[in-house]
Image: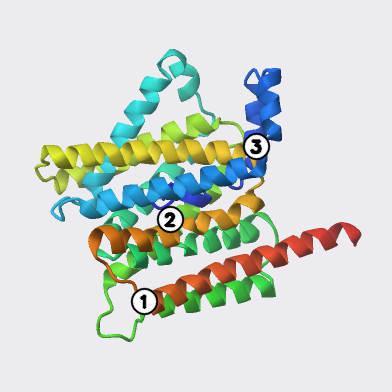
C-alpha cells in the first residue's frame, strides 16, 4: 500500500510469482531476456528496497498535504493520474492491455485496493509515520495467514501462535487502555485487512490476465470507487498540492512496476525480509522531515509483528521440506 501506498502494496504480488514467470516467458522472450532469469537474487532484493524508498517518499508527500483534502480526493487524483500514465504508455497495445477474462475479480480487487488505500491515506495524514508503518506490517502476516487458510489447510498451531504474537504487537503499539488512544490508529489495520483481500484475489486474476492488465484495472476501479466520495468531499487544490499528488501517483506506479519485476525474477521467500525495510525508513523520515519522535512501544510492537511473520515463515518452510519425505 504499493500495498501501503505501494505495497501493496508490498505483499500483493508474492503469490503470483510462478504465474508471472510463465507470462513473462510467453511475451516473445529473446535469448538475452532469458539470461536475465539468472540474475543474482539481490537484484530483486534491491528492487524491494527501492520500493520501500519510493513508498517512504510517497507517504511523506501524503503526510505533507493539506489536512483539508479528504483521503478519497487524494486517492482519486492518485488513481486517475496513474491510470492515464499506464494507458499512455501502452497506447499502441491498448486493446490487448484492456482484454480480461476476470472483470468481476478485477473489480473486487480494485474495490479492496480502494478501501486499503483510502484507509492508509487517512492514517498517514494524521498519524506519525512510524506508528502507521508499524501497524501496516500486519498486512504481511494477514496475507500469509489468509493464503494458508484459503488455499491450503485448516489453521495450524504455529499459525495461531504467529497471529497471537502479532496481535500482541498491535496492542503494544495501540495502547488501547491509554488516554491518548486515537481511533485513527485502527485505520492502518483496516487498510492491512483490505490489502490482504486484494492480495488474495491476485490468485484468481493472475492466472489469465497479465500483470500490466491487472495494474491497469486496479487503478481504473480505484478511481471509479473513489469518484463519488471525492466529489462529495471535494476541496479546492492549490498548484503545489497538485504537483505533490502527481508525484504520489508516479511513485505508486513505479513501485508497482518494481514489485512486478522483483517477484518475476526472484523467489518471494528470499524477498520477504527486505519488505520490512520500510519500517526503519518511515521512522527516519518522520524524525528528519516532520520532527516526529517515535516511542519504544512502536519499536517493540513492530518488532513483535515482524518476528511473528518470520516465525510463521520458518515453520511453513520446514513443514514443506518434511512433507515430501512423508
As drawn, is 121 to the left or to the right of 205? left
Assess disc 1: are there few (<14), some (14-19) or many (≥20) residues with their C-alpha within 10 Å of its C-alpha: many
**Viewer-proximal residue, 114 or 63?**
63
SS assignment at label 1: helix
The first of marks 3 and 1 along the sequence is 3
SS assignment at label 2: helix
Which quadrant of the rendered structure holds the C terminus? bottom right
Of marks 3 and 1, the one in the foreground: 1
Of marks 2 and 1, the one in the foreground: 1
Q: Residue visible at 63% across and 41% down? A: 17
Assess disc 2: are there few (<14), some (14-19) or many (≥20) residues with their C-alpha within 10 Å of its C-alpha: many
Q: Which mark is on residue 174?
A: 1
Q: Which mark is on residue 194?
A: 2
Give the residue number, with chain letter if any, for mark 3.
Answer: 19
Q: In which quarter of the image is residue 311?
A: bottom right
SS assignment at label 3: helix
Q: Residue visible at 13% across and 45% down? A: 234
Task: Give the CA distance from mark 3 to mark 1.
Answer: 38 Å
Task: Give the CA distance from mark 2 to mark 1.
Answer: 19 Å
As drawn, is 18 to the left or to the right of 226? right
Q: Is residue 259 visible?
A: yes
Picture coordinates of residue 61, whole percent (x, y): 26, 48
Picture coordinates of residue 257, whole percent (x, y): 48, 35
Q: Which mark is on residue 133?
A: none
Vertical position of residue 120 compared to residue 298: above or below: above
Vertical position of residue 53 compared to residue 156: above or below: above
Assess disc 3: are there few (<14), some (14-19) or many (≥20) residues with their C-alpha within 10 Å of its C-alpha: some
Of marks 2 and 3, the one in the foreground: 3
The first of marks 2 and 1 along the sequence is 1
The first of marks 2 and 3 along the sequence is 3
Q: Kindly check if marks 2 and 1 are in contact, taking CB atoms under 8 A apart as contact.
A: no
Amino acid at each position: 500500500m504499493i500495498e501501503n501506498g505501494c505495497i501493496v502494496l508490498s505483499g500483493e504480488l508474492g503469490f503470483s510469482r510462478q504465474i508471472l514467470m510463465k507470462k513473462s516467458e510467453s511475451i516473445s522472450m529473446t535469448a538475452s531476456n532469458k539470461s536475465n532469469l539468472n540474475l543474482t537474487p539481490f537484484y530483486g532484493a534491491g528492487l524491494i528496497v527501492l520500493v520501500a524508498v519510493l513508498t517512504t517518499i510517497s507517504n511523506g508527500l501524503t503526510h505533507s498535504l493539506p489536512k483539508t483534502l479528504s483521503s478519497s480526493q487524494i486517492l482519486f487524483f492518485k488513481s486517475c493520474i496513474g491510470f492515464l500514465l499506464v494507458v499512455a504508455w501502452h497506447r499502441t497495445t491498448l486493446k490487448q492491455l484492456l482484454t480480461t477474462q476476470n472483470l468481476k475479480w478485477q473489480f473486487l480487487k480494485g474495490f479492496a485496493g480502494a478501501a486499503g488505500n483510502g484507509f492508509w491515506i487517512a492514517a498517514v495524514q494524521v498519524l506519525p509515520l512510524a506508528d502507521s508503518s508499524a501497524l501496516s506490517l500486519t498486512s504481511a502476516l494477514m496475507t500469509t495467514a489468509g493464503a494458508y487458510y484459503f488455499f491450503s489447510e485448516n489453521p495450524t498451531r504455529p499459525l495461531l501462535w504467529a497471529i497471537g504474537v502479532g496481535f500482541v504487537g498491535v496492542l503494544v503499539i495501540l495502547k488501547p487502555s491509554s488516554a491518548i488512544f486515537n481511533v485513527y490508529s485502527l485505520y492502518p489495520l483496516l487498510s492491512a485487512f483490505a490489502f490482504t483481500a486484494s492480495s488474495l484475489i491476485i490468485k484468481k486474476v493472475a492466472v489469465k490476465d497479465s500483470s500490466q492488465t491487472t495494474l491497469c484495472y486496479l487503478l481504473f476501479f480505484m478511481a471509479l470507487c473513489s469518484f463519488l466520495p471525492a466529489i462529495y468531499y471535494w476541496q479546492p487544490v492549490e498548484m503545489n498540492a497538485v504537483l505533490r499528488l502527481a508525484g504520489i501517483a508516479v511513485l505508486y506506479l513505479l513501485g508497482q512496476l518494481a514489485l512486478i519485476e522483483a517477484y518475476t525474477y526472484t523467489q518471494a521467500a528470499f524477498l520477504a525480509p527486505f519488505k520490512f525495510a520500510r519500517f526503519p525508513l518511515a521512522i527516519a523520515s518522520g524524525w528528519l522531515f516532520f520532527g516526529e519522535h517515535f516511542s519504544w512501544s512502536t519499536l517493540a510492537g513492530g518488532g513483535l509483528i515482524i518476528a511473528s511473520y518470520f516465525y510463521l515463515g520458518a515453520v511453513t518452510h520446514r513443514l514443506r521440506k518434511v512433507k515430501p519425505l512423508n
